[in-house]
């Protein structure tokens, strides 16, 4: 994964998933916004980008996750270039990083 990163990357952070989950997250900080990847240790370290997060051109300011009866849910805190703060939910069913839903958090 690191070999394919563009020169615009300024930082790379790995965030473990919920306890007992083979999934973890990688935040790639670029000049124009952050990218979010899901990594599964059970699938030969397969990584899948959450492209919906990239299109927001926002900074990821926090990420926490938990296991529920359906799979892993992560709460992704974002700050837009205009300073607006918002939270998105990332739902993963099973252990396949590509099978995810990313949407604004519902309160």
Image (cartoon, grey):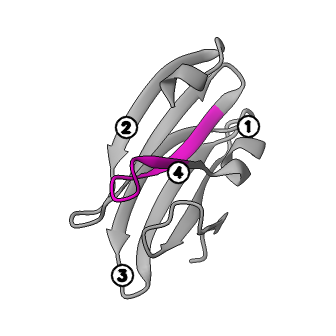
Label 2 SS: strand
Q: Earlier in the sequence, mark 1 or mark 3?
A: 1
Cα distance between the residues tagged 3 and 2: 22 Å
Cα distance between the residues tagged 1 and 2: 19 Å
What range of the chain is rendered magenta? 34-47
As drawn, 10 above or below 21? above
Q: Earlier in the sequence, mark 4 or mark 2?
A: 2
Mark 4 neighbour density, 10 Å: few (under 14) some (14–19) many (20 or more): some
| Mark linked to residue 77 | 4
- Name the residue carrying label 3: 68
Cα distance between the residues tagged 1 and 3: 29 Å
- Is disc 1 in contact with disc 3, using a CB cutoff of under 8 Å? no
Q: Earlier in the sequence, mark 1 or mark 2?
A: 2
Closest to the camera, between mark 1 and mark 2, is 2
Label 4 SS: strand
As drawn, 11 above or below 86? above
Q: Where residue 37 sits: x, y (%)? A: 53, 45
Image quadrant holding the C terminus, namely bottom right
User: Which quarter of the figure has residue 20?
Assistant: bottom left
Mark 1 neighbour density, 10 Å: few (under 14) some (14–19) many (20 or more): some
| Mark linked to residue 14 | 2
- Name the residue carrying label 1: 57
Cα distance between the residues tagged 4 and 2: 16 Å
């Amino acid at each position: 994964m690191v070999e394919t990163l563009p020169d615009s990357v300024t930082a790379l952070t790995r965030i473990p998933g919920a306890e007992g989950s083979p999934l973890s997250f990688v935040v790639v900080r670029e000049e124009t916004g952050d990218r979010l990847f899901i990594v599964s240790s059970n699938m030969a370290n397969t990584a899948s980008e959450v492209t919906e997060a990239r299109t927001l051109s926002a900074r990821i300011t926090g990420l926490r996750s938990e296991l529920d009866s359906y799979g892993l849910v992560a709460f992704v805190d974002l700050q837009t270039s205009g300073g607006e703060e918002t939270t998105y939910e990332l739902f993963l069913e099973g252990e396949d990083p590509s099978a995810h839903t990313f949407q604004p958090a519902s309160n």
